[in-house]
Image: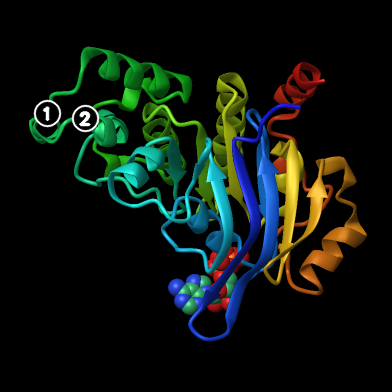
Amino acid sequence: MMEALLSIKDLVKVYGRDTRALNGISLDFYPGEFIVVIGPSGAGKSTLIRCINRLVDPTEGAVVFDGQHMENIKGRGLREKRSKIGMIFQHYNLVSRTNVIKNVLHGQLSNTPLYKSLFGLYSQQDKQEAVELLKKVGLEDQIYKRADALSGGQMQRVGICRALLQRPKILLADEPIASLDPVSANIVMQQLHNISMEKQLTCVVNLHQVDYAKKYATRIVGIKKGQVVFDGPPANLTEPIVRDIYEGKETQMPLQNDNSVTDIFVNEDKQMTGAER
Ligand SMILES: Nc1ncnc2c1ncn2[C@@H]1O[C@H](COP(=O)(O)OP(=O)(O)OP(=O)(O)O)[C@@H](O)[C@H]1O
């Protein structure tokens, strides 16, 4: 049996006196898995991601990433581990007045000595790799554009390149397509999926939209009231299960027959499924 890259055991997070955002979560994530975490608003999805990279300190339980307990490490040890965790954000978190390639190179900051980063002295290898990544996501013509001149979808693709230049072992994405239109959202999800598969990364993506989860995930985790209520391949996520997870709350997207979403990448989808099987 392959060893888990990330192992979460009995994780509990209580905010303040009695907000139990996570109520005993145990999950093992393996290299090459594209995991989409779904669940209604307030279920604990963001808290789970934040406990992994320690933006939030868990109340109880263990998070073991790449052989290291994350709950207690501090300082340099934590920084080193974090440099192996690529983050992708809903609002992209780019430096808006800086150009695309520099934004991508920022991904290497944690691995670059301070004086070098201050003077923008990135290695030739980093620059080449940044350009390669930008080509991969179709942004080779935008390299010297300022980040704030890009569309939302383009900004998120820069965000993906920045996370990848860090050479992470895992990618964590908190609602990466929540601010995008369906066409841009599909491009972003498709590229995130393809690159993760190609590099055999583990990717954990929080999404509100069940149909995107079904379309791109290799594994779906459903969270409700801080607990895992579903864990399995997309094919096993039936409508009654979805209804139970959301319990009358909006899933934000229709479950089936949304052609605006599914038509766009039908061909790529077929190729992808073929390659995966
Ligand atoms: N910093 C905080 N302080 C206090 N309570 C918090 C904090 N962050 C989250 N919570 C609470 O913890 C619970 C889980 O929130 P979390 O943001 O993890 O859920 P979520 O599933 O990501 O929701 P959404 O999809 O709306 O972002 C909610 O009840 C929320 O109000």
Label 2 – label 1 distance at C-alpha: 7 Å
Identify the residue shown where x is 21% and y is 30%: 112
The answer to which of 250 and 50 lies nearer the viewer is 50
Identify the residue shown where x is 77% and y is 68%: 246
In this orientation, does residue 190 appear? yes
From the top left corner, tell me how far across and down residue 158 is, in percent: 38, 35
In this orientation, does residue 182 appear? no
The answer to which of 24 and 243 lies nearer the viewer is 24
From the top left corner, tell me how far across and down residue 102 is, in percent: 23, 32
10 Å crowding of disc 2: few (<14), some (14-19), many (20+)? some
Q: Is mark 2 within 8 Å of ligand 1?
A: no
Helix, strand or loop under label 2: loop
Q: Which residue is mark 2?
A: 112
Identify the residue shown where x is 41% and y is 22%: 133
Locate the N terminus and report the quarter of the image it occupies.
top right
Task: Tell me the quadrant of ligand 1.
Answer: bottom right
Instruction: Reply above or below: 204 against 20.
Output: above
Instruction: Reply above or below: 273 against 178.
Output: above
The answer to which of 91 and 227 lies nearer the viewer is 227
**Label 2 with label 1: CB-CB less than 8 Å:** yes
From the top left corner, tell me how far across and down residue 232 is, in percent: 82, 45
10 Å crowding of disc 1: few (<14), some (14-19), many (20+)? few
Helix, strand or loop under label 1: helix
Q: Which residue is mark 1?
A: 116
Q: Give the residue type that dot 1 points to.
A: Lys
Locate the C terminus and report the quarter of the image it occupies.
top right
Identify the residue shown where x is 67% and y is 68%: 226
Instruction: Reply above or below: 275 against 266.
Output: above
Q: Give the residue type that dot 2 points to.
A: Thr
